[in-house]
Image: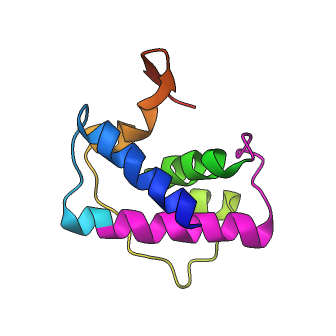
Amino acid sequence: MRHGLLALICWLCCVVAHSEMLNVEQSGLFRAWFVRIAQEQLRQGPSPRWYQQDCAGLVRFAANETLKVHDSKWLKSNGFSSQYLPPEMTLTPGQRQLAQNWNQGNGKTGPT
């Protein structure tokens, strides 16, 4: 899990140069959701949407899912109950698009 968090921090540092930054409160909520989503993947087994099932893939999946709106539809499709969840993040549309800017190598960026 430490390697995943380190990769997440590196990803955030790279993306911030090209996107809107998260404020302190948003960053704390991002971490809380990220950890909860990653833990659920390990507890429940991988989501069908987590198709790159390696450590880096888990980081990308958890980061992408963290930036989504966690409404009742999302909770149900991911097997989450509404108990013991972090508060929902209030993000701008630009911040929600952070997951669309992964560095894919060879100077390319985009979603994974």
Judge from the rendering whether residue 1 lies leftward or rightward of residue 27; answer left or right.
right
Q: Which residues are magenta?
A: 28-53
Residue 45, relative to residue 96: is it above or below?
below
Image quarter for residue 24? bottom left
Residue 99 x/y as whole percent: 44, 39
Which residue is drawn at the image coordinates 43% and 76% (left, top)? 86
Residue 7 x/y as whole percent: 48, 51
Total marks shown come to: 0
Residue 50, relative to residue 1: is it above or below?
above
Please name the predominant secondary structure of the magenta segment in the image: helix
Image quarter for residue 93? top left
Which residue is drawn at the image coordinates 41% and 66% (left, top)? 31
Residue 22 x/y as whole percent: 24, 54
Which residue is drawn at the image coordinates 23% and 35% (left, top)? 17
Residue 66, relative to residue 29: is it above or below?
above
Question: Is residue 48 within the magenta segment?
Answer: yes
Which residue is drawn at the image coordinates 54% and 66% (left, top)? 2
Judge from the rendering whether residue 57 lies leftward or rightward of residue 84; answer left or right.
right
Q: Quadrant of the N terminus?
A: bottom right
Q: Quadrant of the C terminus?
A: top right
Image quarter for residue 4? bottom right
Residue 18 x/y as whole percent: 25, 31
Residue 112, relative to residue 107: is it above or below?
below
Question: Is residue 20 within the magenta segment?
Answer: no
Q: Nearer the viewer, residue 85 or 8?
A: 8
Q: Nearer the viewer, residue 52 or 76?
A: 52
